[in-house]
Amino acid sequence: MNQLEVSTPQRTKEIIAKHKFSFKKSLGQNFLIDGHVLDQIVHAANLSKDKGALEIGPGIGALTQALAQQAGKVTAIEIDRRLIPILAEVFEDQDHVNIVQGDVLDINLRQLFTDQFSDYKKVSVVANLPYYVTTPILMKLLEEKLPLENIVVMIQKEVAQRMSAKPGGKEYGSLSVAVQYYCTTEIVCIVPGTAFIPQPNVDSAVIKLTVRDEPAVKVEDEAFFFRVVQSAFVQRRKTLINNLMMVAGKEKRPELTALLESIHIDPIRRGETLSLEEFATLSIALLAVDWFN
């Protein structure tokens, strides 16, 4: 069974019928049936036989097979036990493809990387992610500082736009800052619902996150940096100083005003206008005062 057979609408329907598989809406299952999109995903991942690929949510294995043609090893994590025998059948003759049953949010990824990819210096995450857990999965991958070269994922178009947004627009927020702190971003392509079975009600996008060797900005306390970022976006329509006062207290307005002015940030700006560099400067300044900790 080759990759083109699995990824076509006809072959997908045949496999689903053979195994009497029914889609679970609660798992956000949408199987990709567009070979052109598969090619774009795999090309963006920049794989080779000396690199590994981690897939999350392989479904019936269309993307998995495309990855297996390019990577030295593919490990796919599938939460749905009903799909394991299907995947086992598809990959029965491919020893370099390993299927792990489990929830990626519960799996010890550092241990998995040690077990699966110790022979590979570079590993990419390549996946068609369920919309409902996109952000938790991506933040786990980034916060655990895994030895990743890049992350190429299919996600909801609006979420991809938020991840790659620049300061000043309505799409720019705490997710933009968090992702761009760890990665550079590139939207590879927009994918219509017709590329899936069943069809989702929204468009998707393939986004490539190239993991930085070092974070985009230097901060003294990473957890505190993200806390400051979150504080700045608590209520988007409020000014930066009003949002920060929700943490520091209204009585600290004079001190907050003076602090912001000392680092050349206008107190009446909104959080969505601050660059990563400005957030880093702000977090360092706030870390130095005990009334914001």
Image (cartoon, rainbow, N blue to C red):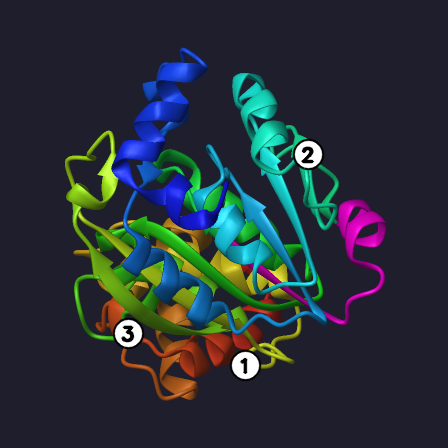
- How far across and down, in percent of the image, does residue 184 sit? 45, 76
Q: Nearer the viewer, mark 1 or mark 3?
A: 1
Type of amino acid at the residue the image marks with label 1: Val
Q: First in sequence: mark 1 or mark 2?
A: 2
Check the image and report above or below for 220 versus 57. below
> SS for tag 3?
loop
Whole-Å distance between the Cαs marked 2 and 3?
50 Å
Q: First in sequence: mark 2 or mark 3?
A: 2
- Given residues 287 and 289, the one toward you in this image is 287
Q: First in sequence: mark 1 or mark 3?
A: 1
At 54% from the left edge and 43% from the top edge, which residue is drawn?
56
Q: Residues within 10 Å of mark 2 (few under 14, many from 20)?
A: some
Type of amino acid at the residue the image marks with label 3: Pro
> SS for tag 1?
loop
- How far across and down, in percent of the image, does residue 211 sit? 56, 72
Q: Which residue is under mark 1?
A: 217
- How far across and down, in percent of the image, does residue 68 sit? 59, 55
- Given residues 291 and 14, the one toward you in this image is 14
Check the image and report above or below for 157 versus 182. above
Q: Residues within 10 Å of mark 3 (few under 14, many from 20)?
A: some
Q: Quadrant of residue 98?
A: top right
Label drawn at residue 100: 2
Q: Is the Cβ of the residue at disc 1 closer than 8 Å to that at disc 2?
A: no
Q: Which residue is under mark 3?
A: 267
At 17% from the left edge and 43% from the top edge, which residue is drawn?
193
At 43% from the left edge and 71% from the top edge, which residue is drawn?
44
